Image (cartoon, helix red, strand yellow):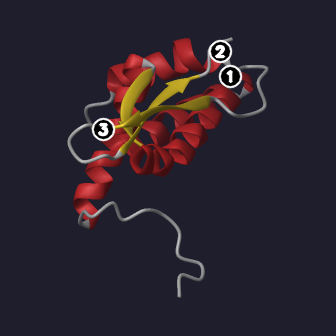
Amino acid sequence: MRHQVKGYRLGRSGGHRTAMRKTMIMQLFDHEKIQTTLAKAKSIQPDAEKIITLARNSLTASEVEKLNARRQVAAELGNSSTEIVKKLFDDIAPRFKTRPGGYTRLLKLGPRLGDNAEMVLLELVSE
């Protein structure tokens, strides 16, 4: 039984899953939309929304809390994320200042030709 088992395995080892999740979230923030499978999109969507909420809440915080939020996001995304963190806090978070949640959208694109996997477009909602 799957009682209280959360997350998606995606047929990968734990390290591979973590690396893929970080990479996909960074690509989502960099390009503001990514095309991927439904299972992968559903696995990263809550994490991306939590990171955006953290950045959005830091807009009205003190300087120490702003720095702490940036460090938390950088730790979550990895070492090579300095430009992504800057874009997230300077461009993306102010866009969602008045939005209470639901920063991403899934648009179904249909099955992939090779293996018939359901493809989606995961994008940031524009306001």
Q: Which mark is residue 94?
A: 2
Position of 97 relative to 22 (above/below): above
Q: Are marks 2 and 1 in contact (CB under 8 Å)?
A: yes
Q: Secondary structure at mark 2?
A: helix
Q: Which mark is residue 59?
A: 1
Looking at marks 2 and 1 on the same chain, the residue that comes earlier in the sequence is marked by 1
Residue 86 position within the rendered picture, expressed as x and y whole percent measured from the top left? 44, 19
Looking at marks 3 and 1 on the same chain, the residue that comes earlier in the sequence is marked by 1
Residue 87 position within the rendered picture, expressed as x and y whole percent measured from the top left? 45, 16
In the displayed structure image, the side of residue 59 where residue 22 appears, left or right: left
Badge 1, how many Cα within 10 Å: few under 14, some, many 20+? some
Residue 64 shows in the view: no
Q: Secondary structure at mark 3?
A: loop
Give the distance between the C-alpha atoms of the residues marked 3 and 1, in whole angstroms: 40 Å
Q: Nearer the viewer, mark 3 or mark 1?
A: 3
- Depth order, front residue of 71/50: 50
Residue of label 3: 112
The residue located at (53%, 13%) in the rendering is 90
In the displayed structure image, the side of residue 125 where residue 71 appears, left or right: left
Give the distance between the C-alpha atoms of the residues marked 2 and 1, in whole angstroms: 8 Å
Q: Nearer the viewer, mark 2 or mark 1?
A: 2
The residue located at (40%, 48%) in the rendering is 40
User: Hey, what amino acid is under mark 1?
Assistant: Leu
Badge 2, how many Cα within 10 Å: few under 14, some, many 20+? some
Query: What is the quadrant of residue 32 in the picture?
Result: top left
